[in-house]
Amino acid sequence: VLYARVRTNGVVQIQFSPVGENKRGGEVYRLYDVGGQRNERRKWIHLFEGVNAVIFCAAISEYDQMLFEDETKNRMMETKELFDWVLKQRCFEKTSFMLFLNKFDIFEKKIQKVPLSVCEWFKDYQPIAPGKQEVEHAYEFVKKKFEELYFQSSKPDRVDRVFKIYRTTALDQKLVKKTFKLIDESMRRSREGI
């Protein structure tokens, strides 16, 4: 039960201070967890103004799965289209983007059995070798695809916004803490113009 994965419904707000001992200025972050399903997206609109950073979670293990609400649409293709759409929103012109390539734990096991090329976006993927080397190769390929999409979708005057990609497994508390420390540092540097 502790490791159950549950879809987000609606909009959930979580407030927290930066993780760790270095809590400069007592900054408080507000994280809005929004449901990614199509019927949940209309609930996001009122949250867009005044956002300092977008944390976009892409479940990289879902490259061979179909949407819950449309069994003809690949989940990764939907993620690609949604990421592209969010990147192009005017209210995010100067907003930092943190991309979480999430569910790495599942991806790591699945990639040994199901080739990335089953997803249309990854049809040009060429596996190299079985084992750990293949996992890293496949992950880097997916990461590169998202980077390319980011730069294609960003106008030249938007490329100075912060863009970082993190490999995550939401169930790994230590990794999540470490990731949020990195995000906090990145956001602080951005605010200070470093």
Image: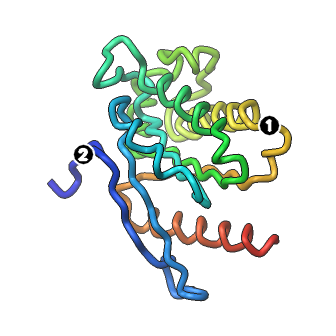
Report x, y in % for residue 63. Answer: 45, 26
The circle drawn on residue 45 is none
Tell me which numbered mark, 1 or 2, is placed earlier along the sequence.
Answer: 2
- Kindly give the residue lying farthest to the right in the view shown: 156
Q: Which residue is found at the position 59% from the left and 65% from the top? A: 183
- Amino acid marked by disc 1: Lys
- Amino acid marked by disc 2: Val
Looking at the image, do the residues carrying marks 1 and 2 touch, with CB atoms under 8 Å apart? no
Circle 1 — which element?
loop
Q: Which residue bears the numbered disc 2?
A: 6
The circle drawn on residue 155 is 1
**Alpha carbon of mark 1 to alpha carbon of mark 2: how far?**
35 Å
Q: Quadrant of the C terminus?
A: bottom right
Report x, y in % for residue 110. Answer: 39, 31
Query: Is 10 situated left or right of 168 in this image?
Result: left
Report x, y in % for residue 119. Answer: 50, 18
Report x, y in % for residue 108. Answer: 44, 40
